[in-house]
Amino acid sequence: MHTSLHTPINPIDEDCLADIEFCIGWQSPEGKHTDTVLLMANFWRDLLPEKIRKGLWGARSGDCLSFSFSPGELLPPFDPGNRYCVKRGDFNEQATRPAFGRFYPKGILRGIPNVFPQNMAPVRCIGVDDETVRVDLNHPLAAHDIQLTALVHGVYRKPFDRGGQSRELAESIASGPGMQARFDGKPTDFFYDGAFLRADEADDAAFYSNARLVTHLDDRAIQTIGERYAGILSPGMSVLDLMSSWRSHVPADAAPKHMTGLGMNAEEMEENPQLNDFVVHDLNRDPRLPFSDGAFDAVLCTASVEYLIHPVAVFRETARTLRPGGIFINTFSNRWFPTKTIRLWTELHEFERMGLIMEYYLRSGTFTELSTCSARGWDRPESDRYYPEKMQSDPVYAVWGRKK
């Protein structure tokens, strides 16, 4: 990814930089999770767990190594002393309300040693009553077994090294993963009064009346979404593109037999070359889907789930239109229409949003075999309109499950 800046060499040694795709695999009671990040490691300066450093030493571009970690090996071990009970007055409720299972910036707390207002590290609320709030400062994966793969994309000779900050690469690899799981298997309290209000409560049909024939994510992120769909969908499926637009991002090798679009703008869907037919329908006005029971093998929803104001009802309806074992996939990033997204979405950490969508699946009572994945750290294409203002590609998150 950085070949224009550095001279490729082989193999990895202390005088090199290396682009490495780190992938964490772990499980929660709710499902399976895979979180990937591409990092450039400086082997002279950055800190890696010894098991990973030894494994990567001498590796070349294209090599892929696998590691297993018990709780406490990759990340700091779980410490019951990192759980605190604070008075409600020591939780800054002017910033936000405490809710069970949710994550908040550590600096929102007062009265805990070595915690300062500037600290943005996430902590989890694990209990709340009229008088107190209980919080957990442990990493959300502290008690989990972790499988990790390291795929070497490129190894480069450093032009120079003039000091700089050392990074704990394990922290970078695991920054975010774990936040999508429930705490102690109990439902997260996402559903407060006003959570599904929007800044613009006017009729959605007016907002979507003008066709927007543009992609809202960069090409690298769109490629990642396509790869995810290709890895889940099977050729010959009947597919519903929920909240559809002028592109569906399903690669040719997934080869749906038939694809139907449901969206808000006919002109956009008419321009979509992958749709065989489409329906204009406002799910926020009527969550019922105008399709028969078991009409589809798969339903996909791309960068749109954040606009649903009746999500659980829509997820139940989606399950109704799926055949037994059919799959429902949601993908999203960190970009949206600010006036039409739900208030709750804007309050959540990016990884916590996967937890919200998992809650939709779980509360609908109609899905099983839940999975999540994330992909971060790729370079933004130089052709993108936001390059070089934004150097990294838009992150991609996905949540999917199968109809029971």
Image (cartoon, rainbow, N blue to C red):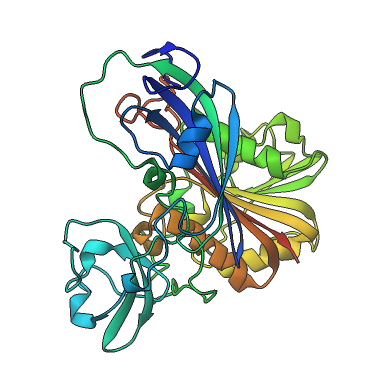
Which quadrant of the figure has residue 316? bottom right
Measured along the vertical axis of the image, is residue 159 above or below residue 269? above
Q: Position of residue 245 (x, y in %)?
A: 57, 41
Q: Which one is nearer the viewer's eye here, 266 or 218?
A: 218
Give me the residue at 61% from left, 32% from top.
271
- Which residue sits at x=61%, y=69%? 362
> At 40% from the left edge and 60% from the top edge, which residue is drawn?
139
Tell me the quarter of the image containing the C terminus: bottom right
* Image coordinates for residue 401, horizontal then vertical, percent: 67, 58
Q: Is residue 322 left or right of residue 52?
A: right
The part of the image, by quadrant, that contains residue 169 is top left
Residue 42, above or below 205: above
Q: Is residue 346 above or below residue 48?
A: below
Give the image location of residue 356, x and y in percent.
49, 63
Q: Residue furthest bottom?
A: 130
Residue 266 visible in the snapshot: yes
